[in-house]
Image (tube, helix red, strand yellow):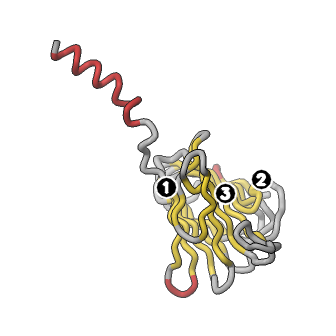
Amino acid sequence: MRRSLAFLVLCLLPILTAGTSSERLDLSAAGGGELLATLHTAGDAVVKFEYVKDGCFFSPDHSEPCFTFSAVSGTDSVPISGCVENKDSKLNVSAQAGCRAANVKSVRILLANGGTVVLNGGTGSHKDCSPVPVTIEAHGDAYHVAAWNGCPETITCAGGLGQVDADKGDTVKGNCNAMFVTRH
């Protein structure tokens, strides 16, 4: 009986713990006007970052520029904390956050344990470029930085295997394996 109960608990554990992931995206103002976005993930979350020149979702007349962030893992929204959050009422998590662009002097996106970041379109499409420097630091065993967007960024590889899609003018440094860096 005890073995059956132990077997049942082991079989149900993945189901019982589903949805309790510690994946999250934290947005904060660091010193010197830096906007810091830190993704905490097991490696499969995707963060989308954009500069919105013509007004953000939280601006009543859509005239205030901002930086927007959204994050998903599979089909689930990843909770976001910081700045102005736009709640997904169905999931009761922040599906998107917008950070006012005023007084921001730089943006740093930190993939703490891997994951993917898509910047301003990131796959060849071009949107408004950030008026301040954007830096991406990719840590962890597996990551993907999609920065092929016509905007200047600095990408630092500080982890294991990673894939970087970048513009010819982007700065790519650190221990990026040249085989996995594609310039467009």
How many marks overall?
3
Mark 2 or 1, closer to the camera:
1
Residue 15 rendering spot, x and y as whole percentages = 41, 29
Q: Which residue is mark 2?
A: 123
Residue 1 vs 50, above or below: the answer is above
Which residue occupies 57% across, 85% down? 33
Residue 32 vs 76, above or below: the answer is below
Residue 56 vs 12, above or below: the answer is below
Task: Report the Cα–Cα distance between label 2 and label 3.
Answer: 12 Å
Left or right of residue 26: residue 123? right
| Quadrant position of the C terminus in the picture | bottom right
| Quadrant position of the N terminus in the picture | top left
Which disc is residue 24 wearing? 1
Residue 31 rendering spot, x and y as whole percentages = 50, 84
**Residue type, mark 1 in image:** Arg
Q: Secondary structure at mark 2?
A: strand
Residue 151 vs 125, above or below: the answer is below
Q: Secondary structure at mark 3?
A: strand
Q: Quadrant of residue 118?
A: bottom right
Which residue occupies 57% across, 80% down? 34
Which disc is residue 48 wearing? 3
